[in-house]
Amino acid sequence: MCLPPGGLKPEKPPRRREPRRHTLAHGIEYGMIRRLKLLEEEREVLQKGLQAVERARDWYLRQIGIVQDKLQATSHGHANP
C-alpha cells in the first residue's frame, strides 16, 4: 500500500449504508422465499375452502331439487311419503 504525499493514510472505501442482505444464488433473499412459501400455503388453504363451499352448494342444490320434485308430485295428487 502506498502512502499519498504528506504521509496520510489512504482513504478507505465508504461503508455500505444498506445492511447486508442474506441471499441465495442469483440474489434471491431468504425472507422473500419464506414470504412466497407462506403465500402459497395461504392460496392452498383458500382453494380447499372454496372446494368445500362448492361441495356444500352442490348438496344444497340436490336437496332443493328433491324438494321441488316432491312438491310437483304432491301438486299432481301423487303424494309420496
Image (tube, helix red, strand yellow):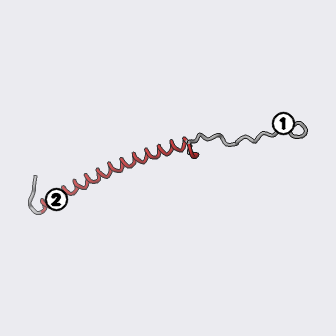
Q: Is residue 58 left or right of residue 30?
A: left
Q: Are marks 1 and 2 in contact (CB under 8 Å)?
A: no
Residue reaching furthest front? 1
Residue 69 — which label? Answer: 2
Task: Tell me which residue sits at (59%, 40%) in the image.
Answer: 22
Task: Tell me which residue sits at (15%, 61%) in the image.
Answer: 72
Residue 40 in picture, x, y percent from top left: 44, 46
Residue reaching furthest bottom? 76
Residue 9 — which label? Answer: 1
Residue 39 in picture, x, y percent from top left: 47, 46
Quadrant housing residue 76: bottom left
Residue 28 in picture, x, y percent from top left: 56, 45
| Callout 1 crowding tier (Cα within 10 Å): few <14, some 14–19, many ≥20 | few
Please determine whether, in this image, residue 43 is positioned above or below residue 1. below
Please determine whether, in this image, residue 67 is positioned above or below residue 48. below
Q: Earlier in the sequence, mark 1 or mark 2?
A: 1
Quadrant housing residue 9: top right
Looking at the image, is mark 1 or mark 2 nearer the viewer?
1
Element under disc 1: loop
Q: CA distance from mark 1 to mark 2?
A: 96 Å
**Residue 43 or residue 19, whichever sits in front:** 19
